[in-house]
Amino acid sequence: MSLPGFGYPPAYYFVWILPRNLFSRFCGFLANVRMPSLLLTPLIQLYSRIFGVDLTEAKLQVSDFHTFNEFFTRQLLPDARPLDPDQNAILSPVDGFVGEFGNISNGLLIQAKGLDYRLADLLEDSERTRKYDGGKFITIYLAPQNYHRIHSMVGGEVSEFSYITGDLWTVGPLGVYHVPNLFARNERLTTYFQTAKGECALVKVGATVVGRIRVSYHDQISNLHSAKAKQIVLETPFELERGEEVGLFELGSTVICLFPPGQIELNELQLGQSVNFGQAVGRFSQNSKE
């Protein structure tokens, strides 16, 4: 339902007037407030019932969490997410839902039906825009019930990443269907993986209420006041096994996996399909370089 004469749902205008970055930092602050177990445990249990969180997969018991953020960024039991055994498989880096996938055509990616955005705006890197144009992409949305840690979809090393400041619109359906250039407008942190099959990239997109994005290979975090965009080359490349942790969202958001032309073949995916970290979403092509 939209407001007469305006064309957007009422919630859009609420988010529009909201100081989104400041509000998200405040939410992050609240999520890190230590609370007594007598109060925190029932709150986590209520949240889990509302959103359908499977607490049996968590490494810690509910009573062991001291803040909501510890719960949001919970680790899973060691065998909760087995990795696809095919070493050529491209792993889903997160638990979530497939938002879009397909070819990067003429520098454009699909945000939603009838709504495209430019790879050049997403990466803000002309050389890499040329590198990935004509390749493949997968967008995966992390819902509130999902596991919020992010893992490597391939084995290799990280020697470079970029952090781009931006807005923090919601990445739920309200944002995806109503905010043009959403993923290229929001704050984002992109990890570049160097593999035996060439480079690929993982874009972590910020969103409303997401307190921070953190990565395992650097002390860079997102959503800081007066932050500036940066491209950082690591002095020592960070080695990653396939499936190893790359970072985390302090509450859910979206990741976009990017692959250059000819590097991978996508599995038969469906829009809205639920995927788990470690599940194969594609595989390296036979003719991709060794």
Image (tube, rainbow, N blue to C red):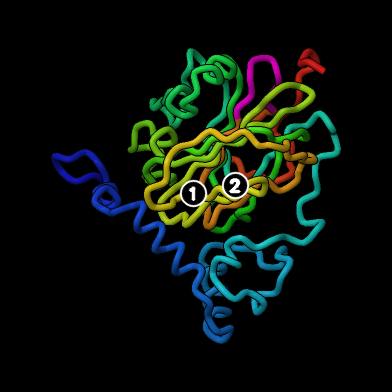
Residue under the image location 60 percent in, 67 percent down: 70
Residue type for callout 1:
Ser
Q: Is residue 287 left or right of residue 219?
A: right
Q: Nearer the viewer, residue 198 or 85?
A: 198
Q: Would residue 260 be counted in the magenta stretch?
A: yes
Estimate the spatial distance between the alpha carbons at disc 1 and disc 2, rounded to whole Å.
21 Å
Residue under the image location 42 percent in, 46 percent down: 227
Residue bearing the label numbered 1: 222
Most extreme residue toward the bottom is 38
> In which quadrant will I find the C terminus?
top right
Residue type for callout 2:
Gly
Question: Magenta stretch?
Answer: 258-266
Q: Position of residue 251 (x, y in %)?
A: 52, 57
Q: Is residue 51 above or below residue 8?
A: below
> SS of the residue at dot 2?
strand
Residue bearing the label numbered 2: 96
Most extreme residue toward the left is 5
